[in-house]
Each structure stands twice: as structure tokens, then as C-alpha cells.
Image (tube, grey):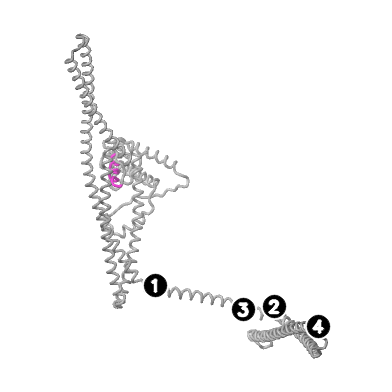
Amino acid sequence: MGVKGMKPEEELADLQRKYQLLEGDRKAYYETSQWTIKQNRETVAALKRENKELRNQLAQNTQKTAKKNEKQDPQKEELDKLRLYVKELRKKYDDMHVITNQKLGGLNKHLDAIKDLERDSIRASDEDSPMMRHIRMLENRLDKALIKFNEAQSIRRTYDQIVKRLREERIGYDNQLAAIDRTLKAKEHDLEELILMSHDANHAKEVAKAELVKVDAQLAQERQNREKELVERRGQVRARQELNAKMEAREKSRVEIQLEAQGDLNAKQEAVLTKTVVSNSLYHAANDQKLEEEEKRITTFEEAFRKIKEATGVSDVSEVIQKFMTQEDTHNNLKQINEESQDRIDKLKNERHELQAKLEELKYSGSGLDSSRRLVDEYEQKLAEAAANCEKERIKYEKVAKILVAMKAGIEHLKDKLEGIAIDEPNIPLTDDTVVDVLAQSEKKLMKTLQMLGGDDEAVRQALATYKANAEADLPQHNSRIEVTAPTHDSEEEDSEDYGSDVEDAMDVPDRGYVKNSSQQITEKSGRKGKKKTAKGGEPPASPSGKTNTGMAGGKSRGSRPNFE
């Protein structure tokens, strides 16, 4: 309990001071007792060791005395002295053991007193008094403050390390920026060289294609000539074979007839006949040998061509020749590119050595650092502005690309819908280069459709109403329509800012339902205007091919025509 007239803080301080004093006394007494216990244990251990040694000596002496003669009286006296000394040591040991037990009893009493004090202090702190609640509140606040202080110190050390690291890195920014500039210039130079090489390669490719076409034509002509000559020679060989066969048969029949008519021949006639037969056989052998040689050459050529076809994977002669010429051109181009690349590598190495030397000179000269720092800052600012502008232009480009893709898809859809309408010119395939031509062709088809309908506005409106009902029936239930009006352009010249805002407004590309709804509204408005003019002037509206309805197929309403399915 605190003294009356003292503040809670003073009472807390007083209690803390008393508790610290008790804690200090307890620690001092505990340390003293532990030191005493340690000394007593060491003394007991030393006495035990000494007693053990004396027992060993006594046993040894007993054994020795048992062996010696009983006449050795001086040794017996010494043994009695040792026994007395052992008794004295044992008495000292018993006294020390008693003292140790007493000390341990006192130590236990002091420990019990300390435990009682601790329990009293715990009971005092557990009291649910306003002062103790205030103390606990202050202690909690102190703990929170310490936690926040430690967190702030940790964060401060982290930021100090970050600042140190940034300062160290700032030293190398100049070198890094210079290296990036050099790399950028080198890449730009390489890009220019590659573009030039690409142009040269394309030109060489076109020239090679032209030469290849010429060579193909020549080869085709030569092949035709060779085939024609081969057919002629084969025909000649077959004709000679047939002629020889006929001559042999005729000669054989003639000889047989002569032999039958004249009987036996004389020696001269037999010699003439033998000579004739031998000459005919030699002639036939020569013809057969020529024929075999021709067939061997043809077989050799066919085998070589078959191997070439297997190696190249193509069957046409022109394609085989084109592959060989292409490989030769590719080899020459690669060899040339290799030489140019080696020259460029050597040149870049020399430039690198020169730039490293300049960098070393600038690094150790120490002049112009402030101006270079300002230039770096200016370039960094310009780089940031350029990056921002680049990002804006990229966003604009992406939006415009989306719009163009949507327009192309719409034009393709319109082209598919008008596929069944026939005109004089053939259908144009839709590509990036033929978008305008496809639109013009679709316009002609629409004009032809309007001409086929004639001036029957009621039929047009009825068809539009039927189409609108079918389109609304096909739409999903959650689809919602928004009333829009046709855009009007007061001026064709707009600056870049207006263009950017238009691109941002056009980010949401209109879908198919939006385009159909807009077309139907514009058509209905034009129909209502025609009715008003008829009511005022008493004249019917002009035909769709006239001037009054040309807006359906040209000008500003070109993008809002209805789709006839």
C-alpha cells in the first residue's frame, strides 16, 4: 500500500525501487550461496580424493607389513601414526559435512524467503486497484512505444541502405547512359545496313528469278528438242529393224527358191552366197550394237535423273534446276554476308577500343562533370517526354487498329451479304489493299438492288420493317438499344488533339446490331423527309437512281446503308 499524499507515479517509482532492492539482495545472496556451495563441494571432493589415496597407501602398507618380519617395530609405529592421521581426517570430513548440511539448510531457508517475497510481489501486482490498472496501462503504452520505436529504427536502417545503394548506383549512371547511347547508335547503324542488304537481296532475288525464268524456258525448249530427236531416232531404229527383218526374210525366201529351182550350187555361187550372208549378218550386228549403245545412254540418263529426283525431292526438271541454282545463289549470298559481317565486326571492335580510350580519358580528366550532369538530366527529361508521347501514340495506334479491324470485318460481312447480287465485273477478294475496291463494288451492288426495287418506297419500308422484326427477334433478351444520331462533320481539317480525342471516343467499336439500328433509323428519317416533301410540293420523291436518293449510296451516308439479307 502506498503512503497517503503521494502521487501514483511516485508510489509506482517507490515500489519499483523497493522491488529492485529486493531483487538485488536476492541475486547477491544467491550468488554468495552458490559460491559457498561450490567451494564446499570442491573441499569435499579434495578430501575424498585424499582419503582415497590414504586408504590406498594404508592397504599397501598393510600388505607390506604382512610380508615383513614381526621384528620391524619402527614400521609398526609409523602405521599407528598413519591410522591416527586417518582418524583425524575422517573427523575433519565429518565436521565439514555437518557444516555443509547447515549451510544448505540456511540456503533453503533463504530460497523459501525469496519465494515468499516473489509471491507477495505477485499478489500485490494482482490487486485490481486503480493504481495497478494505471501501471499496467503505462506499461502497455511503454511496450507499444518500444515496438513502434524498433519498427521505426528498422525502417530507418532499410531506407538508409536504399539511399546508400542509390548514391552508389548514381555514380555509374553516366557510364550506363553513354553505353546505352552507343548501343542504340550501333543498332541503328546495323538496322540501316540490314535494310540496305535486304533491298540488295530483294533486287538480286528478282534478277535471279528473271534469269531463272529465261533458263527454264531454254531448258524446256532443249528438253522438247531432245525428246523430239529421241523419238525420231527410236523411230529410225525401229524402221531399220523392220527393214532388216524384211530383207532377211526376203533374202531367205529368195535363196530357198533359187535352191529349189536350180538344185545344188557350184563353188563360186556358194562363195557369193556366203559373202552375202556374212555381210548381212555384219550389218545386222552393227545395227544391234548401235541400238544397244543408244539404249545404254538412255538408261544412264534416266538413272541419273532418278537419283537427282530422289536427292532433291522434286519430279519436275525445271524445279530440279531451280533448286540447284537457288543453292548456288544461297551459298554465294551467305559467303558474301559472312565476309561483310566479319568486316563489320572488325570495324565495331576498333570503334569499341576507341570509345574505351575516350571513356578513360573523360573518366580521369575530371572536367565538365557538372555540364555533363546537366546534359544527362536534360536528356533524361527529353527521354521521359518522348516515352510518354510514344505511349500516347501507341494507344492511339492500337485504338485505330481496332477500328480498322472492325471496319474490315464489317466490309467483309457486307460483301458476304451481297454475294448473291450479280454485276458485270468479277468479285474482288478482300485484302488490306482492296478494301476501297470492295466497298465500291458493294456500292454498285446496292445501287443495282435499289434500281431493281425501283421507286416503290412502300416495298422498301415493308422490307425494312420485316428485317427489323426478324433482327429484334434474333437478339438476346438482355440486349439494350441506344438511340444515336448520324455524325456530322462541319470541317474536314482537324488538329492532332481533336484527332486524339476522336480516337479515344471511338474506342468502343460499334457492333453489328448498332450498325443495323443506325442504318434503319437513317433510312426511316430519309423516308419521312420524302413524305414531307410530297405533302408540301405534291410531287412524288425521285427514284433511287436520281439525285434525291444518291445519299443512300455515296457521300456521308456511305457508312450507314441498310444490309439486305
Quadrant for the N terminus, please.
Answer: bottom right
| Residue 387 vs residue 91, the one in the foreground | 91
For the residues bearing labels 1 and 4, Cβ distance under 8 angstroms: no
Q: Is residue 387 above or below residue 453?
A: below
Select label 4 or label 2 by which is in front.
4
The x, y position of residue 221, in whole percent, is 21, 36
CA separation, marks 4 and 2?
A: 76 Å
Mark closer to the chain start, 2 or 3: 2
Type of amino acid under label 3: Glu
Type of amino acid under label 1: Glu
Residue bearing the label numbered 4: 66
Q: Is residue 391 magenta?
A: no
Q: Is residue 437 magenta?
A: yes
Residue bearing the label numbered 3: 139
Select label 3 or label 1 by which is in front.
1
Mark closer to the chain start, 4 or 2: 4
Q: What secondary structure is marked by label 2?
A: helix
Residue bearing the label numbered 2: 126
Residue at position x 30%, y 72% in the image: 359
CA separation, marks 3 and 1?
A: 45 Å
Type of amino acid under label 2: Asp
Q: What secondary structure is marked by label 3?
A: helix
Range of residues picked out in magenta: 432-444
Q: Would you say the magenta stretch is mainly helix, strand or loop?
A: helix
